Image (spheres, coloured by chain):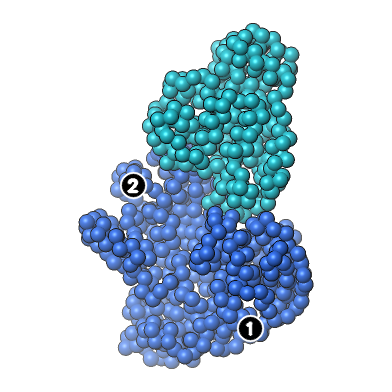
Amino acid sequence: MVTPHEIAEYIKNVPPLPDTLRKTLDALQHGELADAAKIAAGDPAMMHYLKQVVNSAAYGFRNELKDASQIFSALGIERAKQLLYAYMVTLIAPKKWRYFTLDSKGFTQFQTALMRRWEKIVKKESEEEKYLSGAAIMSAGLVVADAIFGDHASDVALLRESGDYDLDTILERVSHLRFDRLVTTIAEKWEIEEDVKRLVTLAFGKEDCEIDDHVCRLARMLHLLLFYELSRPLMLDAGANVFIRFNTEFADPVFDTFQEIVGIE
Amino acid sequence: MRPVIKKQKIAFFSPQGFLDGNNASQLITVQDMQALKSSNVSMVLVSMKKVIFFNKNGISIVLDALTKMHKEMKVIIGFCDYNRKQYDAFFKFFEGDVSFSLFKTLDIAMLFTGGNEAKGEEESVLIYNDDATQRSMQAIEIFDRGYNPVVVQTLDDFTARAEDKEKFVEIVDRTYLGLMGNRIAAKTRGNCVIYYLKGFLDGSVTEQFDVMYHQNSLKVGFQLFMFDATRVSSLNIHAANFFSKLSTAGAEHGALIAIVGLDMERTPRAFVDELEDAGIMFFENETDFFTDEIVQSMSGGGAAVKKEKHKLTKPVVARLPVLVSSTMDTLQMMTSMMALKEDMKIQPFEPRGNDLMASSIAFYGDIEGMVTLVMPREMVQKSCTLLIGEESDDTNVLADALSELVNIVAGKSKTQLQEQGVNINITLPRSYVSIDDLHATLEGMQGVQVNFSFEDYPFTFYLSP
């Protein structure tokens, strides 16, 4: 099936942040929204993505946001950063998905829903806004999974007929690698803050952590949220529900709060 | 979502996360139902192990799909792998009117399909349910499947008895039986397939008997078939004819059919004579059967009545490259080792290497034959790491994993042959922990033996008629 060498090659080929994106993020890091908007305006592809997402029903702005300055001021620093990382994930996403039956529209829909609900959770939990980027980075996991298993869909289907294996378990058994580590490696390449990186790593539910630790609590929420979104009809149809193993014990302590925030009945 | 099929007996869907009115219709699709129709499973379940939230809408939609399968395929339907809160929720949702089954674990569900291999002579199962009717139903179903049910009446008794885990092959609690199937229960013990009959046997036995399971057992080399008739009151001419035909058909494979524990005083002598003429043997009890000389001579898998010799046909041999490449692709995938082909000959089976394990699976349809994979135990451990998660030294675990491996190989072959317009069905796999048993099964056969080496391990692919 997949070899560690092939996976290493894939990760090696994940591009670092493009120049414009890095400069936009730097400006945001320094609290310069106007400068960030100016830099972003010079990248038509990035602007196209931002316009498409912020004007979608998920964001619900009353008026159409037409230019970079409108978009950046409406979003604010951390939400803008989150969207820029989400854009970066779409840059490494395949044009044609091979393992999951998804297209770019469907993936953006999933990613946007994940980010919007995550904003709500981070706000309700009174956590720092820097953690908003966690959901966007998390979505990179599906892109990595599609790249790794795209050529092996029939083998995975055969294996899954004989046992209840998620893609992460198969990956670990054939290569001793895991998606949490692969996504963290990508996050390092994209110079994501340490705390956010830790949040993403923990949110895969593979490592135990103390509930008193606020990043751990957030990670449990993000793990739950990921599976809430992977349980939607679009993602079930796409075969994405088996991306990683859902750790019920990990998610359980925060379930009631999650249910209240997200409004599940 | 595609279901997992366990031992060709249970199909189970394993959703993760949330199950509600919005997504439940995607869990079991029309395509999934179609695919399951040809699988011959006797139970279809939804595992709740990785479900953190479900509501009545979601469960009702899933139940609609399951009920459809129950009606069309006569399978047992329900849920498994739930916690106490989830178990209680099922009853709350349906206000006690629960027509589906609930199995605390998949292993308990397997017990009710007869999918487990018997490990000893008397296997006890501890049963507790706070409802007396359920306790009795479960005890009867368990008994019908050849186990010794130990039923306790109170929770305190149950807690005390459950501490002696070693005394029981399974402990059944928080389990509820809804609509059950009426198939004749079967399980295997060593080289013998045991069927459990009950009540008055008439023409309906033909509908209740799983003919495909029986034929598949013959195809993978089972030659001893025992019908436990200790709970049979009597039989009529239709049932006698059924057994007579079954015995005649099995003779082609050198199979021996025995009826054990039948009440001879209530059975017309003429029926017994007719069945004896058809080659069926009668025994008073199980011990007499297993200690009988003829039966013992067959216990290694060899036939007392010599098998009618078959030869590999040209169409089968023509598909050899597909069968071999499916096998090698799968094994290379599972082991991450490179295979080197050494030689190929038409010959009787000849083992290579020591401490060997093997597994066979037969196929039938447009072409017929049996594929056997033979490899050293150490290679089985490596090959099955992907399936069991770690290297194990437990012989039963390895034999089970090897069966799964052969099942995967056969599944891949089936798909690849289908692409070439050749349709086959596959039987249950059968694992051999002793190469002598395999020898006995393949005795006198000429097959194609293809030898490989996987790094330092000898590996044999054997295609036989």
Res. B266 mark: none
Residue in front for this viewpoint, B63 or A240: A240
Q: Which residue is mark 2?
A: B84
Residue in front for this viewpoint, B461 or B342: B342
- Quadrant of residue B379 within the rendered picture: bottom right
- Among numbered discs 1 and 2, the one appearing first in the sequence: 2
> Looking at the picture, does residue B158 appear above or below residue A79?
below
> Dot 1: within a 10 Å radius of its alpha carbon, few (fewer than 14), some, or many (20 or more) residues?
some
Label 1 amino acid? Answer: Glu
At x 53%, y 37%, the residue is A204
Q: What colour denotes chain A?
A: cyan
At x 49%, y 70%, the residue is B210
Where is residue B185 shown, x and y percent of the image?
43, 69
Q: SS of the residue at dot 2? A: helix
- Quadrant of residue B101 within the rendered picture: bottom left
Report if the CB atoms under discs 1 and 2 are less than 8 Å apart: no
Label 2 amino acid? Answer: Arg
At x 71%, y 63%, the residue is B455
Res. B443 mark: 1
At x 36%, y 71%, the residue is B123
Q: Chain of mark 1?
A: B
**Count of marks placed on residues:** 2
> Looking at the picture, does residue A208 appear above or below residue A74?
below
Q: Which chain is blue?
A: B
**Residue A70 seen in the current view:** no
